[in-house]
Image (spheres, helix red, strand yellow):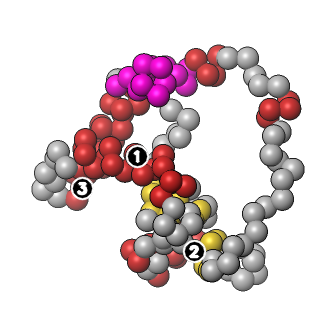
Amino acid sequence: MIVSDNSTEQTSHAILIWVKEARIEWHYIAPVKPTQNAFVESFNGRLRNECLNVHLFDRLSEAPSIIEAWRTDCNTVRPHTSLGGLVPAMFTDQARRAPPASPELRSAGLDRPPPTRKKGEQRLQLSGPDQGAGSRVKKSIWFFWGDRRT
């Protein structure tokens, strides 16, 4: 999934074609509402401060392995205060062993109608007109890779 605030680098023809061909879900946040994307905003700042600003990349090909090493450290070594001092991998293991939630909790919100368009929202056609799918256009782009549960 990509979460975006529709800045200009996210509206290039190449990006739009790639998203369509890869069948990637794209979610847009409301204009001037970074709090709707607080998790990703926090992640972006942490990635930039702890990884990208610390390493000098001689070649673009070096970036994936360095970023992956940072991600692995963050998810398997470093404790997170938001998880009660556990590393995300340990927290995930505990959550998987926990008893399943009641059916009432699992189905909460599934019967809600989809959100309606707000005044001033634009739509961007990402898939062919035959499928009729589109996404709200707003503004920044964020990629999640790997298993988001870990």
Q: Quadrant of the N terminus?
A: bottom right
| Residue 149, image quadrant | top right
Do the residues bearing badges 3 and 1 touch, measured as CB atoms within 8 Å?
Answer: no
Kindly tell me whether residue 144 is visible in this rendering: no
Which numbered dot is residue 42? Answer: 1
Which numbered dot is residue 61? Answer: 3
Task: Tell me which numbered mark, 2 or 1, is placed earlier along the sequence.
Answer: 1
The residue lying toward the viewer, choosing from 124 and 83, is 83
> Label 1 crowding class (10 Å Cα cut-off): few <14, some 14-19, many 20+?
few
User: In the picture provided, is 88 more to the left or to the right than 71?
Assistant: right
Q: How many labels does the image show?
A: 3
Which numbered mark, 3 or 1, is in the foreground of this view? 1
**Residue corresponding to mark 2:** 137
Label 3 – label 1 distance at C-alpha: 25 Å
Kindly tell me whether residue 107 is visible in this rendering: yes
- Range covered by the magenta-colored residues: 78-93
| Residue 29, image quadrant | bottom right
The residue positioned 25% from the left and 46% from the top of the image is 49
Name the kind of residue labelled 2 in the image: Val
> Label 2 crowding class (10 Å Cα cut-off): few <14, some 14-19, many 20+?
many
Q: In this view, does 91 lie above or below 128?
A: above
Residue 83 is inside the magenta segment: yes
Task: Tell me which numbered mark, 3 or 2, is placed earlier along the sequence.
Answer: 3
User: In the picture provided, is 111 more to the left or to the right than 128?
Assistant: right
Residue at disc 1, secondary structure: helix
The residue lying toward the viewer, choosing from 82 and 110, is 82
Name the kind of residue labelled 1 in the image: Ser
